[in-house]
Image (spheres, rainbow, N blue to C red):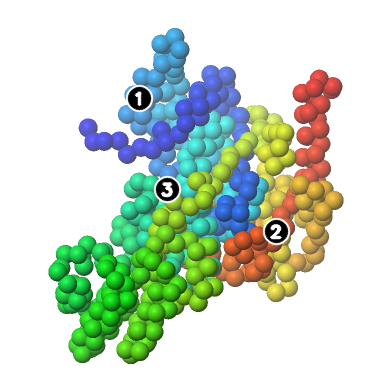
Amino acid sequence: MAPSTSLALLTDLYQLTMACAAHREGLTRHEGVFHLFFRKPPFKGGYTVTAGLETALDFLRDFRFDESDLAFLATLTGADSAPLFARDFLDHLAAMRLTVDVDAMPEGTLAYPHEPLLRIQGPIDQCMLLETPLLNLINFQTLIATKSARIAQAAKGEPVLEFGLRRAQGIDGALAASRAAYIGGAAATSNVLAGKRFGIPVRGTHAHSWVMLFDDEREAFAAYARALPNNVVFLVDTYDTLEGVRHAIEAGRTLRAQGRELLGIRLDSGDLAWLSIEARKLLDAAGFQKTVILASNDLDEETIESLKNQGAAIATWGVGTRLVTGHTEPALGGVYKLSAVRRPGGAWEHRIKLSEQLGKVSTPGILQVRRFFDAQGQLAGDAIFEVDTPEVGSIVDPADATRVKHFGATQAHEDLLVPVLRQGERVYTPPPLAEVRARTQSQLARLDASRKRILNPHGYPVGLTPSLHALKTRLVAEHRARAKGTT
């Protein structure tokens, strides 16, 4: 039998045990609304770039429990060694076809804490089963797209090449990271499989091993130039960096005599600021003003910003480990919370999760996000509101109810969550990845510079509409009183 390609078991066990309990208790006809969101932006930054939606839609399209999935689940046992899942529940899974509705922010959208990136509505057991895989698919790519955007921002328009394949977290992590890095702003990747699958431009040079293969660096450069005369970028720091630059210039002169050009040199170690400045002097003096200096070696946004402040003569940035691993932030920290329930034939009932930490109190209702723009088209603020109360004129800061921001009645705006699935069927065609990347750039161009700072960015206004804030406050008070037995 061919190996299974089903990903339905890409979930935590507790999702299945809850779905089983819902089935046994006759709750599968209850509907729920869940929102996927995060509580704080990664990297202490001023924005987050959404990514992973197309991958999630592909997962939802193919969601089925196949025979091998059910056979495995049948082997699981409880504490009494009896089967964990009864046959009728396994039969229910076998017949399950998604009928959920999903609304989502398009990839490449700037998002902020507590704003739903996805809204999932449908049978409660289906919504439960989708929690873990959706978080897995959205969290990581959003994290890496945000990291990439910050790195591209630090590079100030100079190309950023994603070189992280060898340091990525496995095959899936590498492909997802390459895709997300491109969305965030990377110009190309070294990952050839990602280039094939996603249409991302691929770029690369050669490794130190090529130089070490020969007895002499000059010979190594000459041989490489003969083999690939239309793609010559030399790695010059195998032995002595500035001598390597001089040897690259010699090979460049030979190329030029053949009607070709030395495209660039790469620095991968040492004092990149000083070496790039000295290398630039050598190249310019030899008539290679158009030869680009590319740098790599554990770069990230802070290092790039520092190098540029030092006057480094680097024009292209190869960023690997610290990009594809989301260096300094192991995960986005996205969560998936129930916010409304509807019994068969009934009305929607609000649900809220309380916490001793204000930031962990969830927002009830069926939510949408409206983004407002100022007269110049810049992002002015976001309102989180219930879809059945769409009148939005002001927002209340969830952390400080005395802080209220008002929007004009005719102020330009857009609602960020768009329909992507209806009754389990796709109603949204994901745009080409290049368009998603362009969306990121367009959104960032409309965000004030103070809110894009790498360090200590100015806050962006996001709040609840007054009616939603009042509802949330009332529910918090009611649930706390109920918990204390005072109602």
Tell me how far mark 1 sits from mark 2, CA to CA.
49 Å
Along the line of sight, which residue is nearer the eye, 118 or 447? 447
Q: What residue type is labelled 3?
A: Asp
Whichever of callouts 1 and 2 sits on the residue coming sooner in the sequence is 1
Q: Which amino acid does label 1 sit on?
A: Phe
What residue is at 22 percent from the left and 81 percent from the top? Answer: 251
Whichever of callouts 2 and 3 sits on the residue coming sooner in the sequence is 3
389, above or below 71, in the image? below
Helix, strand or loop for disc 3: helix
Q: Which amino acid does label 2 sit on?
A: Gly
What residue is at 72 percent from the left and 49 percent from the top? Answer: 385
State which mark lies toward you, 2 or 3.
Answer: 2
Tell me how far mark 2 sits from mark 3, CA to CA.
35 Å
Helix, strand or loop for disc 2: loop
Q: Dot 1, how many residues are within 10 Å of its Cα: few (below 14), some (14-19), or many (20+)? A: few
Discs 1, 2 touching: Cβ within 8 Å: no
Whichever of callouts 3 and 1 sits on the residue coming sooner in the sequence is 3
In-image side of 39 versus 408 (left or right)? left
**Residue identified by numbered label 2:** 459
Residue 248: x percent and y percent? 26, 79
Residue 274: x percent and y percent? 43, 74
Along the line of sight, which residue is nearer the eye, 148 or 112? 148
> Label for residue 58?
3
